Amino acid sequence: MGLHTNIGYADSTINGTSGCVGCELFMPGHPEHATCYARLVHEHRLAAARPGLYASSFAEVRLIPGRFAQAANWKDLRGTARPDKPWLDGLPRIIFVGDLGDFLSPAVPDEYLERELLGAIQSKNGRRHFWLLLTKQPQRLAQLSLKWGGLPGHVMAMTTVTTQATADLRLPWLLKVRAKWRGISVEPMRGPIRLAKEWLREAVPYPPPCRGFRIEPAIHQVICGGESGMLARPMHPQWARDLRDQCQEEWIHFFFKQHGNWLHESQGGPWPQHTPAHQWPDGTVSYRVSDKSRRVLDGSEWSQMPAIMEAAA
Ligand code: SF4
């Protein structure tokens, strides 16, 4: 449970379940799909420290009742400053649900989610915060949102995509989630991603209104970041640049989280001799670095946040 988190776009994290069904970053029996950071933390630290809550295998999903309710009771941060994350100043506490596993894994019953998660979000204290529901199962989030009569206004429905193929698969489902707010986490970014116009403007008249008219996009925020960890693979900054430019054209808030454990030659240097290097087809090079948290992309930090203050109870 994380009252405080290093994740730049959130104040806290919470996991009311442990384990995960898996995704393109973790497929049991496929060592080439094993970069999931949550699995490493789960199997190498949490399972030994708290065996009752965390199974030895990450693939075994367990319920942890009461966790979401604890998060709902955390201190109200509305109107306060965050010296380490000034872009969150004044906003409600932003709670990231599910940073150590997918809370919508099939083994988690609907009834549990309704009672534990929705119950906490809708509780008197839970309404003081803003909740990010981040999942790689947006089809299930869409079904639940229908069943629940829509997600509450202080919730952002989010899905993670890593490639164009996963974007093509998951984003149409994200748009089916009945929610006031929707966001996309592109992390770790594994290739260029083009956001189709019909995804972005589904909720507005098409063609776009003339200048001066505020477009309300179907997607409100995009988070972008490279991969970190021992098995991290490099991200070309051009992929992040292109995604950022698409977001700016479509009035979508763009948050560049980090480059990860590889840094492109255009983003830093000089490089010590013998630094592991990756050569790109365009002839440029990325280098392996220990500081995974570098946030500057082409000389600027991108920390745009939507006006979620309006959603606070
Ligand atoms: S969905 Fe998230 S937690 Fe689950 S295996 Fe994939 S990256 Fe890891």
Image (cartoon, rainbow, N blue to C red):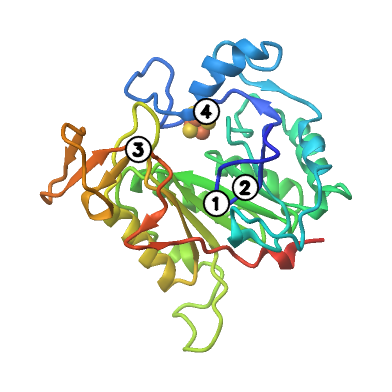
> How far apart, in angstroms, are the residues tagged by discs 2 and 4?
24 Å
User: Which x, y percent locates residue 74?
Assistant: 80, 43
Residue beneath disc 4 = 38
**Relative to residue 227, is residue 38 drawn left or right?**
right
Residue drawn at (89%, 50%) of the image: 124
Residue beneath disc 1 = 174
Examine the rendered structure and indicate whether residue 240 appears above or below residue 206.
above
Q: Is mark 2 within 8 Å of ligand 1?
A: no
Residues under numbered marks 2 and 1 in contact, where contact means CB atoms less than 8 Å apart: yes
Q: Earlier in the sequence, mark 1 or mark 3?
A: 1
Residue beneath disc 2 = 142
Q: Earlier in the sequence, mark 3 or mark 2?
A: 2
Q: Quadrant of residue 58?
A: top right
Q: Earlier in the sequence, mark 2 or mark 1?
A: 2
Q: Earlier in the sequence, mark 4 or mark 3?
A: 4
> How far apart, in angstroms, are the residues tagged by discs 3 and 2?
34 Å
Residue drawn at (27%, 49%) of the image: 236
> In what element is the residue under mark 4?
helix
Residue beneath disc 3 = 261
Q: Is mark 4 within 8 Å of ligand 1?
A: yes
Q: Quadrant of residue 163?
A: top left
> How far apart, in angstroms, are the residues tagged by discs 2 and 1?
7 Å
Q: Earlier in the sequence, mark 1 or mark 4?
A: 4
Residue drawn at (70%, 39%) of the image: 3
> In what element is the residue under mark 1?
helix
User: Which x, y percent locates residue 49?
Assistant: 64, 13
Looking at the rendered image, the quarter that the C terminus falls into is: bottom right
